[in-house]
Amino acid sequence: MPIRFKEVSYIYSPKTPYQYQALDKVSVEISDHKIIAIIGETGSGKSTLIQHINGLLIPMNGEVAINDFVIKANKKKIRDIKQIRKQIGLVFQFPEYQLFEETIEKDIMFGPVNFGATKEAAKKLASKYINVVGMDDSYLPRSPFDLSGGQKRRVAIAGILALQGHTLILDEPTAGLDPDGEKELLKLFYNLNKEENKTIILVTHNMNHVLEVADEVIVLHNTKILTKADPITIFKNQDLIAETGIEPPKVYSFIYKLQQAGFDTSSLTARSTKELIEQLAAILKEKKNES
């Protein structure tokens, strides 16, 4: 179920002194069953873009198509919007602030019950998805407010997953976490994509994460789509990175320095420091053999 934007524009507070153009004639297709990263400088339109995907915002111009379901401009009410929101889960930055039930089990059950599941079915979903996010059933009777920040975020994500949609949208999902917490969540998103076939749409300022897990990258700049490509292609393009003001991944910061020193980096396709070391070692070995 690819998601297609066609000439979508959006303005906050139109016809007021606070008018602000957030998206300007955006056209892009978001591929199905992949990990898609949406990147760009602050104010480029990333969060506005993803809020159009499940109808939290409605285009002022253009349309958003999710399979046969089309959200057209300036609609006051979207028919069957609940079904779209069941299929496309949006996890806001700091989703743990949305927890409110007295137990973790009830918090995860809340969404499925609201969409018509029986309490018995919702309990089974709570048990399944607390385990999917790396916790276990012993947490279910506990209060969500007794958990660490990272655990709260996992519970909030479990609540979205319990709706059993096909797409998970995450807005800065690792914000505020320590490096171990970031690593665990990235592994979770990767596994959800590879093992559960979920489409993962990831909005982040952390380019190291983008390089590590993304299949495709959409680059927003000044409210427009600048390009869409695989992460290697994106980060090899120094002019593009400079234009957007994005801080490149550490791996590519080092590759840029190698280029400046006259080293041929055209064959490098590393996604991690380990891969970069291995590829450089192979190049140096080949040069040594040639000499």
Image (tube, rainbow, N blue to C red):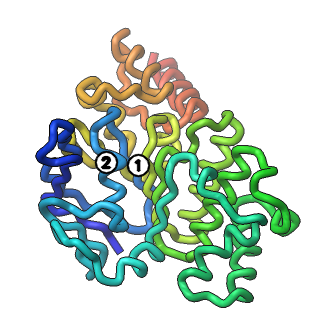
Residue 225 in view in this figure: no
Left or right, residue 59 beside residue 271: left
What is the residue that sits farthest to the front in this orientation?
Answer: 16
Q: Earlier in the sequence, mark 2 or mark 1?
A: 1
How packed mark 1 is, by other alpha carbons closer than 10 Å (few <14, some 14-19, many 20 or more), is many
The amino acid beneath tag 1 is: Ala
For this rendering, which residue is in front, 243 or 85? 85
- Could you say where residue 64 lies in the image, as x and y percent from the top left? 23, 67
What is the residue that sits farthest to the top in this orientation?
Answer: 261
Q: Residue at x 50, y 75 (%)?
A: 165
- Residue at image mark 2: 218
CB of mark 2 within 8 Å of CB of mark 1?
yes
Helix, strand or loop status at disc 1: strand
Helix, strand or loop status at disc 2: strand
For this rendering, which residue is in front, 187 or 95? 95
Residue 114 in view in this figure: yes
